[in-house]
């Protein structure tokens, strides 16, 4: 992926609802108001601008309920058994690389954890990169977060990090020269802290 120059910031989805009640006396009464924040959507858990240093989301998030990987039979069976619902993803771009963040939604938190266990297993990685040798890493500040770096099928330097929040499996992927683990870990910590480690709870 060639780096671009787009700098489109993501704005969180916040809704305000004002409810008024009329008074019943002869004197005018001030109507009480209630302010509510809209229920979170899957898009709120995607990467926002600069949560990974020098990486900014571009284009609009897209959601798809089809098999996101065109998996072979074994992977498709795992995905269905995990209770997969949909994938929401958004590309990101920077001066020296590019990336993507995604949220895979499952019926239960156990399903999200089950799919992550498969996708980060040796078998799951080989399904995506049959000939690549990867180096694994963890993100100590976020429970269960871990990923890998290595070359893709064309020899490009890539890295991916995975973690679960509720019934969502989160992923950040990078194709960039230079340090990848530090940048991926920064993104995980930023999303986890911003969202309180939850997802559509």
Image: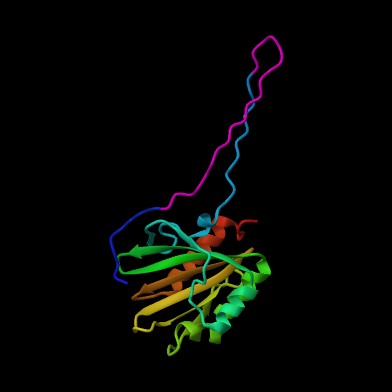
Residue 26, image x and y in percent? Answer: 69, 9
Residue lying farthest to the top in this orientation: 26
Q: Is residue 62 visible?
A: yes
The residue range painted magenta reads 10-29
State the image quarter where residue 157 is shown.
bottom left
- In screen coordinates, is 49 left or right of 72? left
Q: The N terminus appears in which quarter of the rendering? A: bottom left
Q: Residue at x 66, y 66 (%)?
A: 109
Residue plotted at (54% across, 41% down): 15
Query: In the displayed structure, would residue 60 be above or below residue 38?
Result: below
At horizontal 39% and vertical 82% (from top left) the residue drawn is: 152
Residue 6 place in picture, x, y as percent:
31, 58
Farthest right residue in view: 24
Magenta highlight on residue 16? yes
Residue 54 seen anywhere in this rendered image of the structure = no
In the image, is residue 151 part of the stretch drawn in magenta? no
Q: Main secondary structure of the magenta part?
A: loop
**Which residue is located at x 62 percent, y 59 percent?**
198
The quadrant the C terminus occupies is bottom right
| Left or right placement of residue 51 versus residue 20 in this view | left
User: Residue 97, how many percent across, how many down?
Assistant: 33, 70
């Amino acid at each position: 992926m060639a780096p671009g120059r787009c700098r489109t910031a993501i704005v969180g989805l916040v809704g305000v609802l004002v409810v008024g009640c009329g008074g019943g006396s002869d004197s005018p009464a001030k109507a009480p108001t209630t302010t509510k924040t809209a229920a979170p959507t899957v898009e709120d858990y995607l990467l926002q601008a600069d949560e990974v240093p020098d990486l900014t989301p571009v284009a609009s998030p897209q959601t798809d309920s089809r098999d996101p990987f065109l998996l072979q039979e074994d992977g498709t069976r795992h995905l269905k058994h995990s209770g997969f619902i949909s994938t929401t993803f958004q590309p990101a771009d920077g001066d020296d690389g590019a990336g993507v963040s995604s949220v895979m939604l499952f019926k239960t938190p156990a399903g999200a954890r089950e799919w992550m266990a498969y996708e980060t297993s040796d078998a799951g990685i080989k399904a995506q990169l049959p000939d690549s040798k990867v180096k694994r890493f963890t993100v100590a500040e976020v429970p269960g977060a871990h990923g890998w770096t290595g070359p893709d099928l064309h020899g490009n330097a890539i890295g991916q990090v995975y973690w679960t929040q509720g019934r969502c499996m989160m992923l950040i992927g990078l194709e960039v020269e230079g340090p990848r683990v530090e940048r991926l870990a920064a993104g995980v910590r930023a999303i986890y802290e911003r969202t309180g480690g939850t997802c559509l709870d």
